Image (cartoon, rainbow, N blue to C red):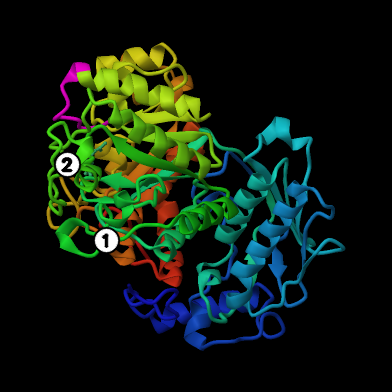
Amino acid sequence: MRGHRLRTPPHRPPRSLARLGVALLLTVAAGVGAGGAAAPGTAAGGARQAAAPAALDSVIPAPAAVAPGGSPYEITADTAIRVPPGSSAAAASARDAGEYLAGVLRPSTGFDLPVGSESGEVELRLSARLKKAVGTEGYELTSGADGVLISAAAPAGLFHGVQTLRQLLPPTVEADTAQDGPWLVAGGRITDEPRFAYRSAMLDVARHFFTVEQVKRYIDQLALYKYNTLHLHLTDDQGWRLAIDSWPNLAEYGGSTQVGGGPGGYYTKDQYRELVAYAASRHMTVVPEVDMPGHTNSALASYAELNCDGVAPPLYTGTSVGFSSLCVPKEVTYDFVDDVVRELAELTPGRYLHIGGDEAHSTPHDEYVAFMERAQKIVAKYGKTVVGWHQITANPAEGAVAQYWGTTGGEQEVIDAAKAGTPLVLSPANRTYLDMKYHAQTPLGLSWAGYVEVRQSYDWDPGTYMRGGVPESAVLGVEAPMWSETLSTNDQIEFMAFPRAAGAAELGWSPAAKLGWDGYRDRLVAQGPRWEAMGIDFYRSAQVPWE
Ligand code: TNX
């Protein structure tokens, strides 16, 4: 994995001297030359800083409503962060959002930025009356000469507002060493809330295993774009990645390899709890997936009795799909499902539990339906709501969520289920699959759903995507899945995720009226230097006029 948060971005040509001169002049003209932010770092570092603050509507996802105006606020060595007092869980979580903000700003600004409840020019405020206007995830951000106020009805809204504030500051704010200011936030007001409740990214930790630290890094990157769900694809033919006490071989043996034959790995329950808690600290809920009845070779290899012929197959390290199935007629299969779902539900604070159900090509259809009927009941028994790949629309339980992964939006079974009340999470493979190659020469990824360039991934509307008269109200949200057959490092994940993960986030958050390729493309340009400062080796698509 590459070093994180590089001070000198590797892909960036040096700026011309002329441009450097202009930037310095603008800095002085803005009144923050000599006395303002004294310069840690080099002249070249200073020249990288935009002198005028980023426009309020330049962030991703595009905010719902923006009213620019008034003086900017400058974060200085004297700035403090004010958070709510009190002993409620909400106040504590709001304070965490304040500490998180300070944690982002301190290394790059070099300022102390104390966090406290007494005073502070950057304030995070809980305000119950905002619930009506912006819900529990929305926020209001107002900025002027005296400070920045982020208000929200709930801590999640404050956290999302913090992400907006972050993007309003220069990209170098992401660096982990001191950079030159000025740290200006444009004046005005943003009123913002999400279009969809479920804004998810999936990581396949089964085909290649990713450590807790690797997943945390991805969580932090997703938080910047207001994702609120992390779907972990925990099991597949190539590996079982979570310890299950009642069936210990699943992880110990079934998790002992991965695609290509490496050592694989699995999360102990404590490690998994740590991941869930870390995601929660970024206001993301983990949706765990145990994929059944297909994609189960790692389980079948671990326990002979789960096989119809009673013979355990060898572990599998290839990339074919559709060859494995749990034994639907055997009763032990449901003991297994019950134990796994019970232990998983105990580890899951969120309401959703994903049971897969895709590509069960080795399970006869009537058996698939019979299995899914029982599996969905078991999930309900442990108090969770089912999510399944859209094949579950064959017989969806009441309330079950179907995750659409087709490419046309036209499957009649899915359309009928959605119209009859099955909510959909949209992850069309030729739009949001982050493992699809960008183009024929992309060294990583697959191409079964076609090439997915940046525009292709962004230029669609989740509210009108499904055919056959499925209304927007049937869409719970959007997901960007990262399958890992060809990906085994963070660098590789990040190259495939960025820019596309930012686009899927915008489709999930921003109102339809704010979507549009031209505007998005221009806002994307500004993310390039931010990703560089974060050490993200993103794909420099020729469709985007990077600086
Ligand atoms: C299809 S999408 C799969 C996965 C593969 C992926 C690769 C889905 C529900 N199943 O098993 O990893 O394609 O893009």
Ligand 1 position by quadrant:
top left
At which x and y percent is residue 11? 31, 74
Q: Which of 433 and 181 is in front in this view?
A: 433
At which x and y percent is residue 241? 34, 52
Q: In which quarter of the image is the C terminus?
A: bottom left
Q: Is residue 255 left or right of residue 451?
A: right
Q: How crowded is mark 2: few (under 14 residues within 10 Å), some or many (20 or more)?
A: some
Q: Is residue 512 left or right of residue 63?
A: left
Q: Mark 1 points at which residue?
A: 264
Magenta stretch in the rendered image: 357-366
Q: Is residue 341 left or right of residue 127?
A: left
Q: Is residue 430 above or below residue 163?
A: above
- Residue 399 highlighted magenta (yes or no): no
Say what amino acid the circle numbered 1 marks: Gly
Q: Nearer the viewer, residue 161 or 400?
A: 400
Q: In this view, does 146 lie above or below 355?
A: below
Q: Nearer the viewer, residue 148 or 273?
A: 273
Kindly report the distance in space between the C-alpha atoms of the residues bearing marks 1 and 2.
Answer: 29 Å
The answer as to whether callout 2 falls within 8 Å of ligand 1 is no
Residue 181 shows in the view: no
Say what amino acid the circle numbered 2 marks: Gly
Q: Mark 2 points at which residue?
A: 450
